[in-house]
Image (cartoon, coloured by chain):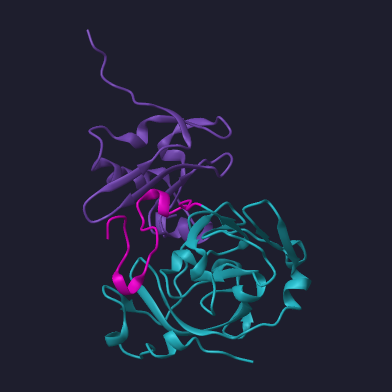
Chain colours: A cyan, B purple
Amino acid sequence: MGIVSPGFHGRRRESAGGLPPGQYLTNDFPVLSAGPTPRIPQDEWEFTVTTESGREHRWTWREFLDLPSETPQVDIHCVTKWSKLGTEWQGVSLDVLLADVETEADYALAHSYGGYTTNLPLDDLLDGKAWVVHRYDGEDLEPEHGGPARLLVPHLYFWKSAKWVRGITLLTENEPGFWESAGYHDYGDPWREQRYQGD
Amino acid sequence: MTLRHRQAVHGHVDGNALAGPLSELFAVDVTAAEGRCVNCGLTGPIATLMVYDRAPGMVARCAGCDNVVLRLVRTPDAAWLDLTGMTWLRVQLPTTT
């Protein structure tokens, strides 16, 4: 069953009037990357949630596909100032992946194949706000856009939507990720234009 | 092959792309300096690094092992330079008498 996040449905616009401050509209899908594109075969892909006590919850590609999926239609906002409206994805809600995970953690650090990391408050991964997606616009997600699967957290700048995601570590203390440790904002709310530390 | 063409094929350009942005910070041309990768120990000029600049910042990786050697983020009022991927940087200077 498809869902549309209510928060984004209410903000969807076809004009620049609905864009967060400082953003411009693009119809392309720019590819940004901090390194070589990992090529991960689906049968080698795994997704692991690791709790603060070290307990691991692991899904193979086949197990991931067997989980109930959703088809979020959301606007995405890159910190390099492009925004793309009404993007269509398919994937598994983090609410599903974290449903049976026992944790007292308040923070999460997403890890990717290739070494990329990004940090988020755990609350921002819950309540229908985040997914691990494997299809875009009706097709398997291309490696350039993060395939086999990427994180999708559309209410934050898109660097938080880690490409090639392989796992999430739950933490009791915040740990800055790749860009957050090099001058970018820890939280990254596009509507408050939180691009850099201090914004 | 132009820099942009090379980027289209390999996804990165060479370390000479760092010359302009780093000239804001240093009095010398750092791309001619030699550095040592903290991961694999490869030593060479900064100009030989693989620079990914279609990103929120510039990410320079070792040509031998892909390790991140240098990161540079330019905000409106500051530059963030991360050199934790580099053991040392050797800058050639004029001989003193």
Is residue B45 in sight in this rendering? Answer: yes
State how many labels appear: 0
Residue sitting farthest toward the top: B97
Q: Quadrant of the C terminus of chain A?
A: bottom left
| x then y, percent, for residue A27 | 41, 82
Q: Which residue is drawn at 53% across and 64% down?
A: A162
Q: Which residue is drawn at 27% across and 56% down?
A: A198
The residues colored magenta run A173-199
Picture quadrant of residue A96? bottom right
| x then y, percent, for residue A163 | 55, 64
Q: Residue at x 34, y 71 (%)?
A: A190
| Magenta portion: prevailing SS class | loop
Is residue A141 in sight in this rendering? Answer: no
Pick the front one: A69 or A78? A69
| x then y, percent, for residue A86 | 45, 87
* Position above or below: A72 against A113: below
Q: Quadrant of the N terminus of chain A?
A: bottom right
Picture quadrant of residue A97? bottom right
* Position above or below: A141 against A188: below
* Position above or below: B45 against A52: above
A100 to the left or right of A160: right
A139 to the left or right of B73: right
Picture quadrant of residue B4? bottom left
Residue sitting farthest toward the front: A104
Magenta-span inclusion, residue A186? yes
| x then y, percent, for residue A69 | 66, 82
Pick the front one: B12 or A165? A165
Magenta-span inclusion, residue A38? no
